[in-house]
Image (cartoon, helix red, strand yellow):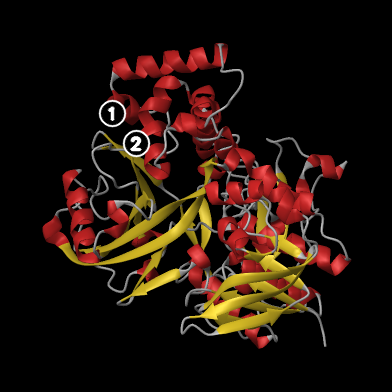
Amino acid sequence: MGKRAIIIGAGPAGLTAALEFLRKTDVQPIVLEASQEIGGISRTIRYKGNRMDIGGHRFFSKSDRVMQWWMELMPPATAGEDVAISYQGQRRTVAVPDDIHEEPPLRGLGPLTHGPEQAEPDEEVEHTIVVEAPAEPESSDLVMLIRPRKSRIYYLRKFFDYPIKLTGNTIKNLGPVRMVKIGASYVLSRISPIKEEKSLEDFLINRFGRELYLTFFKSYTEKVWGTPCDKISAEWGAQRIKGLSLTTALKHFLRKTFSRSAPKVEGAQSDVAQKGTDTSLIERFLYPKFGPGQLWEHVAEKVIAMGGEIHMGMKVEGIEVSGNVVTAVEAVTESGERVRFNGDYFLSTMPMRDLVRAMRSDVPENVREVAEGLEYRDFITVGILANRLDVTEPQGGLIRDTWIYIQEPDVLLGRLQIFNNWSPYMVSDPSKVWIGLEYFCYETDALWQMPDEELKQFAARELEKIGILRTAEVLDAHVVRVPKTYPAYFGSYNRFDELRSWTDKFENLFLVGRNGMHKYNNQDHSMLTAMAVVDGIAAGYVDKSALWSINTEQEYHEEKSQKN
C-alpha cells in the first residue's frame, strides 16, 4: 500500500497540497473538509444566479510559481496573444501559445531566470511566463479575466484615492487646515520616529505621521480588529503593509504620472505579477470568470480525477499520536458518525486552537494556555442587490471601484465590494448593482447573532445613512457569516513561539495556510506553505523553519541573498 497524506481543510493550502502530491509524488492525498464548501474563504457563494466573493481575492503574486500554477489551470481569456499588464519598471510577458507542443508548460519549476540575475528596483526587467493553452480547452469558462483595480476611501461622505495621493481632490476634501497638520506631523515622524515599534500604532505613525494615521487608519483598523491599534502587534503591519509609506505612495503617484506622459516603447511588454510593487499599490490583476471559488472547485475536480479523495462534512475532532509522530485522525460526519483515517503525513489548516484541543497527547499547560488565548476576528458579508447607487462616476453610471474602505465612524460597515466590477459574470442581471457589505466582529457580538432579515435591513440603512444607496432601491439581500476569518495579533500571540515549538516537534505534522499557522496570509502565501511541504516530503526533508519564514511580502525563492 502506498503512503497517504491526510489534509485537514479544502481551502487554498489544502487543495494546493493535494494537487502537488498527485503531480510530484506517489503519496495519495485524503482531504477532510468540515463544511460542504470548497475553497475556504476563497470560495464563491451562489445566490439566485448571483455570486459573492468573501473578502475579495485579487489573483496576483510575487511568486512566479504561484502565477504559473494559477494560469495553467485557468489561462487568461485571450489565447494566441501576449497578455500585457503594466506597472513601473519591472515587466513580464505572459504568453498564451496556440500550440502547446512548441511551448511546453513550466509546471512547478519555480521562479524564472530570464533577464539579469540581479536588478535594481527601478531597472527594467522582462520575464516570460508560458501558459499552457490546450488545443481543446476543458471549458471556455475556465479562464482568468484581467481586471482593473480601483479602491477608494469613503470619509466625510466623500471619496479619497487609495492609497492617499497629494491631488487637488485630496486637498479640497480635507481642507487646508487638516492638510497642514498632516504635512507637519509627517515631517515630524521622519525627523523623530518612534525608535522601538511595539504596536501597530507605532508602525503606522512612523510611516504616515500621527495626523494621517488618526485621519485614515485608526478608525478603520479598529473596526477590523475590534481592538485599539496600540494593543495590536507591529508584526501585523510588517506582514500586511510592509514597504508602504506616504513616501512610497507619493513616488508611485509621480512615476505613474510621468509614465503616462512618456513615449511608449514599441513592443514593450508588461508585468502581470507586478513583483516590484507594494501589495496596496497593485493596479491590475487576474480574476476567475466566476469568482475565486471557480478555480478551487476546478482544482478539487482534478484532485479526484487523479486519484485523490475529498470528504465533505468531515470535522476533525481527534488527532492520535505516538511519541512525536501523528498516526491517525478521527473525524465526525454531520450525522454524528465517527471515521478514522490513518496516514503517513498530516497537513493541518484548521485553527491552531482547535488543533491543540483535538490532540490526543499530553499537552503542556503553557501550550494549552497559548492556544486557548489565540483570538480570531469573524466576518460577515451582506450581499445587496439594488437598482442603482446614489454615488456615480462623474460622467454618470456605476462607480468603477472594486472595493471601498468605509472610514466613516458613525457606521459599523467596514468595507464595500461592488461585485459587478470584479467580474461582470458575478451578477445575473447586468442592469442591477450587486454589492457586498463587509462587517468585522466576534461571534459573541450582537451583530453576529442578529437574525438574517434584521441584518439585511440594518446593512441597507447604514448605506442610506452615509449617502451611498437608498433603501427603496434594494431588491434582495443575502447574508454570509464566516467564523475565524482573521487570525489576530493580540491575545496570547506574544507567546506564540511556545505553541509553534511544541507543534513543530511532531515529525509528520505540518501546519499550513492562514488559520493553520495563525498567520494573516493571502491565498498565494497559503499556497506556498503547502508547496513547500510537498517539495520537502518529495525530497525527504521538510525544513519547518523555512516554512514559517514564508511571509506576506517576501520575494520567496527570489530574494537577492539566494541569488548570490
Q: Is residue 393 left or right of residue 547?
A: left
Q: Are marks 2 and 1 in contact (CB under 8 Å)?
A: yes
Percent coordinates x, y for residue 41 in the rendering: 49, 63
Q: Residue at x 28, y 21 (%)?
A: 175
**177 or 327, nearer to the observer:** 327
Identify the element where label 2 is drawn.
strand
Toward which corner of the image does residue 265 lie, by quadrant? top right
Image quadrant where one finds the C terminus: top right
Toward which corner of the image does residue 454 lie, by quadrant? bottom left
Q: Which of the labelled discs sits on residue 160, or is there none?
A: 2
161 shown above or below 499: above
Amino acid at circle 1: Asn
Q: Which residue is mark 1?
A: 173
Q: Is residue 482 visible?
A: yes
How far separated are the C-alphas under marks 2 and 1?
8 Å
- Comes first in the chain, label 2 or label 1: 2
Q: Is residue 15 visible?
A: no
Percent coordinates x, y for residue 292 in the rendering: 50, 67
**411 or 325, nearer to the observer:** 325
54 shown above or below 366: below
Q: Is residue 129 left or right of residue 42?
A: right
Q: Residue at x 60, y 56 (%)?
A: 352
Q: Residues within 10 Å of mark 2 (few under 14, many from 20)?
A: many
Amino acid at circle 2: Phe
Q: Residue at x 77, y 48 (%)?
A: 558
**378 or 190, nearer to the observer:** 378
Q: How many marks?
A: 2
423 shown above or below 124: below
Percent coordinates x, y for residue 495 in the rendering: 63, 40
